[in-house]
Amino acid sequence: MNKLVKLTVVACLFLTTGGRCAQDKIHHIDQLPQLHQEPQHETVSKRITSRFLHSHYRQFALDDTFSNQIFDRYLNMLDYSHNVLLASDIAHFAAKKTEIGNELKSGQLDTPYALFNLAQKRRFERYQYALSLLNKPMVFTTNDSIDLDRTKAPWPTSEAELNKLWDAKVKFEQLNLKLSGKTDREIKDTLNKRYHSVLKRIIQSNSEDVFQLIANAFAREIDPHTSYLSPRNTEQFNTEMSLSLEGIGAVLQMDEDDYTLINSIVPGGPAAKSKSIVIGDRIVGIAQENNPMVDVVGWRLDDVVALIKGPKGTKVRLDILPAAKGSKHKTVTLIRERIRLEDRAVKVSIKTVDKKQVAVFDIPGFYVGLTEDVKVQLQKLATKNIQSIVIDLRGNGGGALSEAVSLSGLFIPSGPVVQIRDNNGKIREDSDTNDRIDYTDPLVVLIDRYSASASEIFAAALQDYQRAVIVGEPTFGKGTVQQYRSLNRMYDPLLRPEWPILGSVQYTIQKFYRVNGGSTQRKGVKPDIVMPTVSDSEETGESLEDNALPWDSIPAATYTKVNNLHPLIADLSREHVARIAVDAEFQNIKQDIARYNALKDKKNIVSLNYDQRVKENQNDDAISLTRLNEHFKRQGKKPLKSLTDLPKDYQAPDPYLDESVRIALDLAYFDNKNVNNNEIKN
């Protein structure tokens, strides 16, 4: 899903303590504010436009074509699911589409503000209609369904068509609550509070909300990693850069349907440790310790965050609606922790297979000091009988470029690691300048679709140098560098003392290239041995973005390969394929892939029939229980009677890591065999 449209549809102020909206509070459409830009927005718009036009890596013109694209993106940010505005509303603004560029340059943002005000009016009307549906009987016996992805659907042409969409939307939310165990009375009360909460947020929207939306429509049309941060978001960004996170260890954002979405998970944090929360899950309720669960759908993001945060060591319960479409709710209890990013150190474990040992380096991020930590661990392993090493970069979103370069240097002789080109076409090489190699034995690097940026640089370098065998799935494909700049000027307080502190921008200034000349942008790093996964490359990664910078190449750097692994990879692949063909866990993965492919075209179509949904959930539970018991049987353990009997400290198998370890042992075997053969020949 495009990151752009995941931005909150309406970033509005939500002031009530605890966020609960009194049921007897009536909101009227005449309470809606007619928003206009504030005095500072003209200057901020000019500064943003100038910065992007002159300093961004992508060379672009703010012409009619680009203005059209900005308008369309802004429109989709206002109405992502195409269920608020009418086609006639959009047609009313058609003549203004080509003016957006000029409005941004001049700072006179009349069109974006007018369209925002209209969208707010329509949204208010929609939630009033949704409230009216709560007085009708709930019927879940029909065979209707809802399409959860209307991003490419045409806008409705009539109010009757809109009503039909909202009938399904409300029914979907009612059914989700019913499946979570709520009574009809509780369902009505929950949705009544939820919809009133949204109405209140709409009424309390402000001018900065509009400016933030149009500025980000402009920024994200340039590329996915360019953005405008409001003064409030700038403050939050600076706080995060202090290297301290507190709470559950997850990065949250609002999705298009006013749900709080898990955008990423901090390795080592409470959310990661729970193994019950994954990226894409939605938080629909929050409870402190043993207090009642508070529904937070429709809340402003910072209010959700405030409710999640709390003193270290205290418990918070989350009502989670899993990422999988149609899944049932689950409650996850977490203990809050203070997470310091520098504590996310590399972890080393020893895996033993047939009395042979492989060291696994789990690297969650390229933090400052990583290379030294790895070097220390390598020294500790020198006295052990280690056959090979696996470096696990799954879920590693990157970090310090300098660490990617220096870490590569532990495994290769001196030489270039990555090439970087700026927007003027100037190319520089970042190199390892130390001839010392700290580890010379067999090496495997495990990657997945969430390995990005610095992870890709490291994996690509070891692949190009033929130093390691890369296994797993293709990486994310983020091959760009961003720069952060404040929009404040030192003279602003003197000339404009009445202005608030201004926001900031983050924009792309450089692009990464492998030493072989190819970019990691879009394509990422393709493993030498690709493992089967259920994840769809069309749904995750840089290539999914409709405006991601393109893949290209530059001349290769001068470097010398340290090995020739290609002949070995054929042998390793043969052994890998034979092994997973009979491995129980990979057979489960194969079944999941077949099931996913069979339902792929209907993945966003969810039944609104209660019995059907219960049956689907029961089937999912039955599959999970069967697999768990098969796993327990292989371990000589007693079977479970139900999923509720699963121990809280249960560690699920990790077939990808297990197979990587076996590949590492195969690599050591074939590598040693080649050495012996060469010695015999000599």
Image (tube, rainbow, N blue to C red):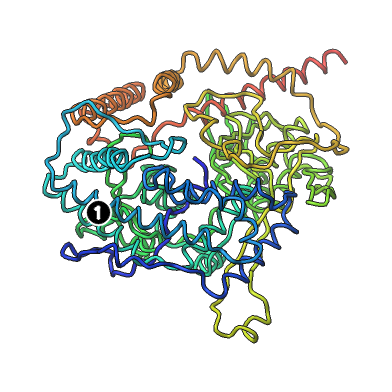
Residue kind at label 1, given as amino acid type: Gln
- Left or right? Give the position of 447 relative to 136: right
| Residue 374, image x, y percentages | 65, 48
| Residue 623, image x, y percentages | 30, 23
Residue found at x 23% / y 39%: 171
- Left or right? Give the position of 97 relative to 668: left
Residue found at x 67% / y 76%: 489
Residue identifier under label 1 = 128
Q: Is residue 441 above or below residue 680?
A: below
Residue found at x 62% / y 13%: 574
| Residue 192, image x, y percentages | 20, 54
Say which of 574 and 140 sits in front. 140
Q: Is residue 267 above or below residue 203?
A: above
- Left or right? Give the position of 38 relative to 323: right
| Residue 251, image x, y percentages | 46, 53
Question: Would residue 80 be visible to someone looking at this image?
Answer: yes
